[in-house]
Amino acid sequence: MESFEERVKELKDIVAKGNAVFFGGAGVSTESGVPDFRSSGGIFSQKYSYPPEVILSHDFFYAKTGVFFDFYKKYMMPLSAKPNAAHIALAEMEKKGLLEAVITQNIDGLHQAAGSKNVLELHGSIHRNTCLDCGRKYDAAYVATADGVPRCSCGGIIKPDVVLYGEALPTGVFERALDYVEKADTLIVGGTSLNVYPAAGLVNYFSGKNIVLINKSGLSVRGATLTFSEQIGEVFSALEF
């Protein structure tokens, strides 16, 4: 197997050709202190009054709204987190015209905080929140500091614009992501186990030249050009953008 330095050099050469798309998941933000979901220390491995998959569902939100927000505010709103080396490098790649889009399953907004402009959020964002009654918009700080269930000035419940279990992906976002993947010459997949559908299915539509996998717990995709099991921040730091 090639050394880390050899693989980084090959990745640099690939990225330098442009027309790349990045598709990432929770592992992109773990180096920013944001817990992932399915690792041994992730959110789903902890003990709660209800399974996280149940709490973070459409039906539970409406049935037990108070319990939902107790969990959501504690575990799903990392407002103090800062972009790490991967977020920053991806923003620089876009700035230099080497990256067409960031497609993310994350809801933390760290790609935008790092400076990325064309970010397709498949699962929504904690930074957008909408009153279910009047449609008024609220930021994440309002929801995080609300006492109990956050409510609008009209009295309506404020719902985070994040995709809960049992809900469809945001209208048009998946289609745009699919278009970018289909047209890309290089697809860089990082920090995702490719276990969450329909998002994970995007990889099946890639028909370009190079697919690069970066995931510390290992990841296998047929026809991959390069594979990294190192920390994603270490890989992107080595690119020296």
Image (cartoon, grey):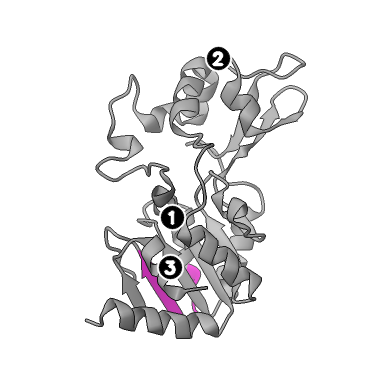
Amino acid bearing label 2: Gly
> Label 1 crowding class (10 Å Cα cut-off): few <14, some 14-19, many 20+?
many
Q: In the rendering, at what x and y percent does residue 25 appear?
A: 44, 53
Mark 1 secondary-structure assignment: helix
Mark 3 or 2, nearer chain start: 2
Q: Nearer the viewer, mark 3 or mark 2?
A: 3
In this figure, which residue is indicated by the disc labeled 2? 148
Amino acid bearing label 1: Val
Q: Which residues are magenta?
A: 205-214
The residue located at (47%, 31%) in the rendering is: 57
The residue located at (67%, 33%) in the rendering is: 139
Is residue 204 shown above or below 58? below
Q: In the rendering, at what x and y percent does residue 161 appear?
A: 62, 37
Is residue 86 shown above or below 124? below
Mark 3 or 1, nearer chain start: 1
In this figure, which residue is indicated by the disc labeled 1? 28
The residue located at (49%, 37%) in the rendering is: 78
Do the residues under discs 3 and 2 have CB atoms within 8 angstroms? no
Amino acid bearing label 3: Ser
Q: Residue furthest left?
A: 1
